[in-house]
Every structure is written in C-alpha cells, then in structure tokens.
Image: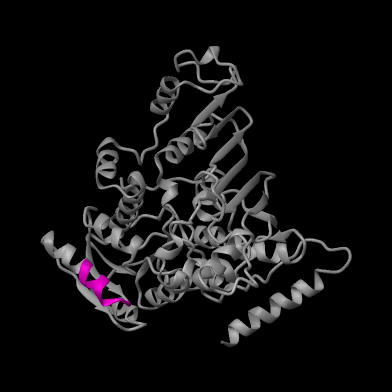
Amino acid sequence: MGRRLFFLVAVSLLLFLSCGKKQGVIRTPVPARAAGQTDMLQFAAEPIADVGVGVVGLGMRGGDAVRRLSYVPGCHIAAVCDVLTDRTVKSLSFLEEKGLSAKGYSGEEKSYEELCADPGVDLVYVCTDWAHHFPVAMCAMEHGKHVAIEVPSALTLEECWALVDKSEQTRRHCMILENCCYDFFELKMLALAQAGVFGEIIHAEGAYNHNLDEFWDQYAANWRLLENSKLRGDLYATHGFGPVCQVLNIHRGDRLKTLVSMDTDSFNGKKHMADRGLDPKDFASGDVTMSMIRTEKGKSILLEHDVMTPRPYSRMYQLVGTEGYAGKYPVQQVLLRPDSAPKEVPSLDNLNVHRPMTPAQLDSLVRRFPNPLLEEGITELAKKVGGHGGMDFIMDYRLVYCLNHGLPLDIDVYDLAEWSCIGALDRISLEHDGAPVAFPDFTRGAWNKLDGFRYAFAE
C-alpha cells in the first residue's frame, strides 16, 4: 500500500511540474531497480520436460485454452480454476472425456491462490476478467511459477512496473498471451521484413477495430463495458501493437520514446450504458481513440481502438518500408519497388510500385523467406485444433516448446509492460490536451543490448 501511495504521489507531482504554459514531454517515474535484481532479456529458465499448466478463468477464452492445450505436446493440464463451480466442472469433464485428469479449484474469490501453490503446476495460464490478471500473475510468481497472462495483462503503469519487478526478482517468465503475433500473415511478413525485403521499416500501423455490440451482454455483469466506462484511452491495444513491435525490434535495438493521443467523445458508449439501465453520465472511453508513437530511432507507429461503431473488423497491421509495403486489412497486399524486388521471384522485375503482388508472386516470395515457426506439420495441426484460425495454438505450442527446452520466450515481461501500458499513457496525454508522454523504459537502460528480434530454437 505504501509503494502504491508513493507511486501515485510521484506521478501527480511530475504531471503538475510538467504542465505549465510551455508544456514539454510528460514523464512518469521510473523506479530504480532493486539491488541484486537484473534484467530478464533473453532469460532462460531450467527446462521442464512436461509442463504442468494451471488455467485460471474458464470462461470463453479459458475454456478454449484448456481444449487447445490438451493437444500441445510437452505439457499437460495439471489444474483448472474458476470462481464459478460449474465452469470448473465443465473443464474437468472435458479432460475426463479425453482420458485426462486435473485438479479443480473453485467457489472462493481467491481459489486461484490454491492453484498457484499447487506443486504440480509449473505455468499459470491466466484467462480471467481484466481486473484479476494482475493479482493472479503476482500470486503465481510469488509461488515460483511461470505465468502467461491474457491481454491486456495490466491496466496501470504501477501494475506494469510491479510485474516487471516481480519477474526480475523471482526469475520467472511473465508473458503476455498476444496471439496475433502468431497469425499466419503477421508471421510471414515478419520473416520478409527480417530478410530486408521491405528495406528499412520506418512506419507501422495497428488497431483493434471490432464492433462488440453482440458481445457486451455475454460478459458477466457487463464487466468489459464497465471497464470502458471507467478508463479513457486505448484499453485493448496489444493485438495490433504486438506484431509491429516485433518487426521494429522494440527493446531489441530500438525503444518506444513518446506517445500522443486523441479521442472522440463517447457517443455509442453512453448509449450502451443507458440501454442496460446503467449510469452513462461519466463514460470515460471515447468511441474512437488514436495513439501516435515515435521510437528512439525515428520510426513511427499509429494505433487505433474502436469497439463502439459498425466499422469492419480490422487490426490494420501495416508495415511501411523504404523499399516496400505490407498490409492485411481490408485485403492482404504486398508492394515492392521494381528495382528492389528479389530477382529470383518470378516476374517481380515487371512489378509497378502501385500494383500489389499477385497471390502467386507473394507465395513464391514467402517460400523463399519462410518463417521457421510455420513448419508444415505444426501449421496443419494448428489449423486442425484452431483458436482464431490456428494462431492461438501456435502461440501455446511455442510457449511450451521454449519451456521444455529452457529457451528464452518469444514474448518477455518487457513486451508485456510496453504493450499493456498504452491505455495508461493515453489517459495522461488525453487529460493534458494531447501532450506528448514519454514511454517508461521498462528495461531500465538495456533496450539496446540485443540486436533485433529473434526466435530461439533447441540445437
């Protein structure tokens, strides 16, 4: 409690001092790393031959996670937990039908503490509502467990810093379950970008534009609508943000430097509250929120968030390079300068810079620069098991593979903090008329220690 009070007072003081007539970049506190604590960049834990997974939160995402993980080699479901007993029973029954068994925890508000203390659990897989992501994750690491957390993994800067510190202190992995980093198009474009096909990536765009009208009432007590009513800013940035951060080598040679934000008023949000008999008066989140980010090395990122309007689903996912472009929505397109396109790919020397590659040309290019995660057998199994078309399965498979072999994870605790803090930084910028806000360096100076994003593999 004392640390929380200190953090809030420090933030308030810094904001007050930075908001005069000649307002500059607003900075938030960067707490000093505790003595004896070191960073988690490329951290590798002891290998675990058969990872015991404990799934906390068995609703829409958690229930499907139990199903997917039952197909992942190198792990087993050791325990499941939900505050609602019927959900725990349903997951246990599913496992029993497959000839599998697990412990079940439920009924108490903090029954997750029993799961975290279970000696059979190596990895706590958190799929609760947003408010419980943080306490469950902290409890897991305090009990010596690795933890993987659904998005967003934290809602405040204080929570982001606490997860970073707890991971560094306990030497336990703390990963954000950003499945869109494992979507097939994003994986293919990452491989092309790393091969230099697009030249140097100088700008990227990401979004979560998804009309949630049909989903609001599926959340118990409308918890997601209530989160939007309480918090201003981009509350769900990571699906569009995570994949482009990997392409831009964030904290692996570059870092996020400043953010500015703008939003609309709440039009549909207030209406959704009123339609459900809830007080719409102070609905915080605008219907559309935009965040613009600049990196230390002069790259830019545009993010959008819109869960309130009828616009088509889009994560945008655009890469703009000095020699080429890739975009996923509304249609998948890749364009290259004719004089920079690899000559080994049929007909690329005849491309016009304003004409996208044909599917055949793109397929030929992708086969020349494959992503190592898209092995034929794994790709086919992922499509069979499913989970947003297979990307959820690839995410789970990679997480377990790295734990099996004692390898660094693809997504570390600094990714978790950087991708989850957008909403908190947006709020500061929005409350100060779009003033620039400095990104905290969650690596505390180690952002340039690595030379680019890379996957780890067993020899």
Q: Nearer the viewer, residue 6 or 314?
A: 314
Q: Residue 187 is drawn in which quadrant?
A: top left
Q: Is residue 69 above or below residue 145?
A: above
Q: Residue 325 is drawn in which quadrant?
A: top right
Q: Residue 203 is drawn in which quadrant?
A: top right
The answer to whether residue 421 of the structure is visible from this angle is no
The quadrant the C terminus occupies is top left
* Image mark count: 0
Q: Nearer the viewer, residue 106 or 376?
A: 106
Q: Residue at x 65, y 52 (%)?
A: 290
Q: Is residue 199 above or below residue 454?
A: above
Q: Position of residue 349 (x, y in %)?
A: 53, 13
Q: Residue at x 41, y 20 (%)?
A: 360
Furthest-bottom residue in view? Answer: 2
Colouring style? one colour
User: In the shown orientation, is residue 226 left or right of residue 143?
Assistant: right
154 magenta-colored: no
Q: Position of residue 219 (x, y in %)?
A: 41, 66
Q: Residue at x 52, y 60 (%)?
A: 414
Query: In terms of secondary structure, what is the magenta stretch mainly?
Result: helix
The quadrant the N terminus occupies is bottom right
Q: Residue at x 52, y 43 (%)?
A: 312
Q: Position of residue 412 (x, y in %)?
A: 46, 58
The answer to whether residue 333 of the structure is visible from this angle is yes
Q: Which region is colored magenta? A: 83-90
Q: Position of residue 221 (x, y in %)?
A: 43, 73
User: In the shown orientation, is residue 414 left or right of residue 386?
Assistant: right
